[in-house]
Image (tube, rainbow, N blue to C red):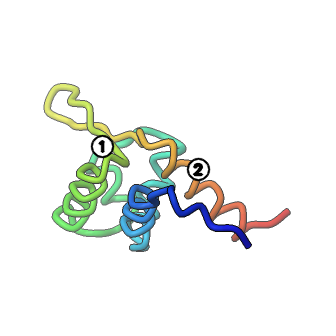
Amino acid sequence: MDFDKTKNYAREAEILKALGHPVRLKIVAGLLSETCNVKKIWECLELPQATVSQHLALLKSKGIIEGHRTGVEVFYTVISDDARRIVQAVFQLSNPL
């Protein structure tokens, strides 16, 4: 086995750490299929709005998602290609053909 000693995997590790919580993994997986506002996310997950907002804030701080304001609502979308690929790979592994 050959390891690349020059590559720093800090960014990948941060994404994996952020996605390591089931709620955040669900949020990102859901946002891959459609852009949503906080209300729709907490209704779908059946979690308190404050809980969802905390998870969204962490995902946003890690550069995984971003929010776009439309009037009084903020709609979230996945912006990290690395996170997108990781989540897609996880769900492909858990749902083999």
What secondary structure is found at the residue carrying circle 2?
Answer: helix
Query: Quick one: label 2 or label 1, which is nearer the N terminus?
Result: 1
Which of the 4 image quarters holds residue 51? bottom left
| Residue 88: x %, y % from top left | 62, 54
Of 10 and 80, nearer the camera is: 10
Q: Is residue 66 above or below residue 71?
A: below
The C terminus appears in which quarter of the rendering? bottom right
Q: CA distance from mark 2 to mark 1?
A: 22 Å
* Residue at figure coordinates x 56%, y 57% from the top left: 87
Q: Is residue 44 above or below residue 1?
A: above
Q: Which residue is mark 2?
A: 85
Q: Is residue 68 above or below residue 81?
A: above
Residue 37 has which mark? 1
Which of the 4 image quarters holds residue 91? bottom right
Of tags 2 and 1, which is closer to the observer?
Answer: 2
Which of the 4 image quarters holds residue 94? bottom right
| Residue 47: x %, y % from top left | 29, 69
* Mark 2 crowdedness (10 Å alpha carbons): few <14, some 14-19, many ≥20: few
Of 58 and 29, nearer the camera is: 58
Furthest residue toward top: 71
Of 45 and 95, nearer the camera is: 95
Residue 42 placement, left or right of 2: left
* Residue at figure coordinates x 34%, y 68% from the top left: 46
* Mark 1 crowdedness (10 Å alpha carbons): few <14, some 14-19, many ≥20: some
- Of the residues shown, which amino acid type is indicated by label 1? Asn
| Residue 37: x %, y % from top left | 30, 43
Residue 75 has which mark? none
- Of the residues shown, which amino acid type is indicated by label 2? Arg
The N terminus appears in which quarter of the rendering? bottom right
